C-alpha cells in the first residue's frame, strides 16, 4: 500500500497540523504503509525552511518531498508542487489531503481525479461554520474555484471528532465522512524523567501551549485568570504561555499583559518542543484551551496523556468526550463562567487529580498512534478495494 499525504506546510509555526502529520506518517509506516509527504517549504510570510527542494528527505523520520512556495502565505501557491503531483500521483494507491483552502490541496485533488486515484480530505476544521466566516470572501471564491468539487469528489472525508463531522456535514451537505482521531506520542504516557522544568520558579501554573492566534481567545482568558487569582489563596498561581505566532499579534498580547498584570502572574516562556514540552505538560496543574474553534486540539490530547486535567471551551470539538470521561472543565466563552471554572479548578487539588487520571485513561483508550495508524490503514484498504 502506497499513500501520498499532501499538506500546504509542515513548519512548526503552523501548529497542530504540522505536528500531527508527522505522528500520522510514522504510525502508518509502522502499520506497513509506504508513506510520502508532499508539501512546500513555507515557514511564515518571509521565511522558508532550510531544506533541499524537489528531492526526498527525512522530515522527523517520515519520507518527505518539499517544493518552493512561490507566493501567498495564505494560499501557498507552488507551481513545482503542482507539476510534481500531476506527474506522480498515479504511482500511489491513495492520496490523503490535509486542509482545503490552499493550492496544494486543490492541485492534489485535481491530479487524483485525472489519474483516477481515490483521495481523502482531512479539512482540519476549516469547514466549521466559525472558520468559514473568517476571511469569508476568500473562502467563498476558493470554494467555487475548486473546493466544492474537491470535497464532492473525495472517496472519504476524514474528521477527527464526531462534532467536527456534524458541523461540516450539516452546513454543507457532505457525505462519506469517517471519524478517526489523532494520536499522541507514546512517551507522554510515561512517568516524568530527568530534571524538572519549573517554568514558573516552582509556583503552580496553568499552561497555554501552542500556536498563538486570535482564535485561541487568549486576551479574554488572561483577563479571566487575573480576576480569578485575585481571590484569597489563589495569588500564588501563574499562567505560563508557551508558544509563538505572528509577531504583531504576539507583541500586542505582551503589551496588554504588561499594562494589566501588575503582579507578573502571566509569563511568556517561548516555544517548547521535545522533552521541554513534555515536562511543561506534566508539571502543569491545568492545561487551558479557551478557543473559539478547534476541530480536535492535539495539545488537549497530549495533556490528557500526561495526566494533566484540562479547561477548554465548548467549541473545542473534543469537549463531549472529555465531559463524558470527567477529564476536565468545559466552559462557555463568557467571562464570568471562565472565572468561576478557574476558581473551582485551582482551589481543588483532589478534583484536578481525579480528572487528570480520568484523562489519562481516555487518552490510552482513544489517542494512541498505533490505534490511529491501524484505523487509517484499514480505511485505505477499504477504499482501494471498492
Image: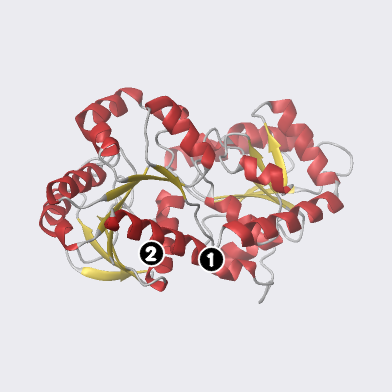
Mark 2 burial class by Cα count in 10 Å: few <14, some 14-19, many 20+ = many
Instruction: Tell me the number on the disc at residue 30.
Output: none
Camera-side residue: 251 or 104?
Answer: 104
- What separation in Å lies between label 1 and label 2 (alpha carbons)? 12 Å
The residue at which mark 2 appears reads as: 25
The N terminus lies in quadrant: bottom left
The residue at which mark 1 appears reads as: 185
User: Where does residue 81 sit, x and y in percent of width and height?
Assistant: 17, 53
User: Where does residue 244 sit, x and y in percent of width and height?
Assistant: 48, 49
Residue 48 shows in this picture = no
At x 75%, y 58%, the residue is 357
Camera-side residue: 149 or 198?
Answer: 149
Q: Secondary structure at mark 2?
A: helix
Camera-side residue: 302 or 245?
Answer: 302
Q: Is residue 333 above or below residue 188?
A: above
Residue 360 shows in this picture = yes
Query: In terms of sequence position, does the residue under pointer 1 or pointer 2 come before the other?
Result: 2
Extreme-bottom residue of the structure: 194
Q: Would residue 84 be found to the left or right of residue 136 on screen?
A: left
At x 40%, y 60%, the residue is 378
Q: Would residue 329 be found to the left or right of residue 175 on screen?
A: right
Amino acid at each position: 500500500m502506497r499513500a501520498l499525504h499532501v499538506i500546504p506546510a509542515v513548519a512548526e509555526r503552523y501548529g497542530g497540523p504540522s505536528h500531527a502529520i508527522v505522528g500520522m506518517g510514522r504510525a502508518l509506516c509502522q502499520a506497513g504503509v509506504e508513506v510520502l509527504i508532499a508539501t512546500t517549504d513555507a515557514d511564515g510570510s518571509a521565511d522558508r525552511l532550510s531544506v533541499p527542494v524537489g528531492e526526498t528527505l527525512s522530515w522527523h523520520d517520515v519520507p518527505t518531498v518539499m517544493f518552493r512556495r512561490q507566493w501567498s502565505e495564505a494560499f501557498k501557491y507552488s507551481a513545482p508542487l503542482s507539476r510534481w503531483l500531476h506527474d506522480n500521483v498515479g504511482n500511489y494507491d491513495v492520496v490523503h489531503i490535509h486542509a482545503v483552502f490552499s493550492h496544494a490541496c486543490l492541485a492534489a485533488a485535481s491530479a487524483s481525479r485525472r489519474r483516477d486515484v481515490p483521495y481523502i480530505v482531512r479539512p482540519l476544521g476549516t469547514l466549521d461554520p466559525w472558520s468559514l466566516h473568517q476571511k469569508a470572501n476568500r473562502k467563498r471564491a476558493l470554494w467555487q474555484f475548486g473546493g466544492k468539487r474537491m470535497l464532492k469528489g473525495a472517496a472519504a472525508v476524514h474528521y477527527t471528532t464526531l462534532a467536527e463531522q456534524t458541523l461540516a456535514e450539516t452546513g454543507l451537505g457532505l457525505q462519506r465522512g469517517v471519524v478517526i482521531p489523532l494520536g499522541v506520542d507514546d512517551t507522554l504516557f510515561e512517568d516524568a524523567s530527568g530534571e524538572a522544568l519549573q517554568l514558573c520558579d516552582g509556583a503552580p501554573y496553568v499552561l497555554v501551549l501552542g500556536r498563538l492566534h486570535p482564535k485561541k481567545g487568549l486576551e479574554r482568558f488572561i483577563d479571566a485568570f487575573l480576576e480569578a487569582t485575585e481571590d484569597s489563596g489563589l495569588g500564588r498561581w501563574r499562567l505560563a504561555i508557551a508558544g509563538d505566532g505572528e509577531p504583531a499579534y504576539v507583541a500586542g498580547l505582551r503589551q496588554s499583559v504588561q499594562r494589566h498584570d501588575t503582579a507578573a502572574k502571566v509569563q511568556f516562556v517561548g516555544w517548547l518542543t521535545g522533552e521541554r514540552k513534555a515536562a511543561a505538560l506534566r508539571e502543569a496543574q491545568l492545561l487551558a484551551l479557551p478557543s473559539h474553534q478547534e476541530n480536535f486540539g492535539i495539545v488537549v490530547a497530549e495533556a490528557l496523556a500526561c495526566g494533566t486535567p484540562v479547561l477548554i471551551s465548548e467549541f473545542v470539538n473534543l469537549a463531549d468526550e472529555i465531559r463524558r470521561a470527567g477529564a476536565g472543565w468545559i466552559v462557555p466563552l463568557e467571562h464570568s463562567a471562565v472565572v468561576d471554572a478557574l476558581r473551582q479548578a485551582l482551589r481543588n487539588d483532589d478534583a484536578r487529580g481525579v480528572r487528570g487520571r480520568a484523562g489519562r485513561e481516555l487518552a490510552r483508550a482513544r489517542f494512541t498512534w498505533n490505534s490511529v495508524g491501524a484505523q487509517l490503514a484499514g480505511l485505505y484498504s477499504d477504499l482501494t478495494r471498492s
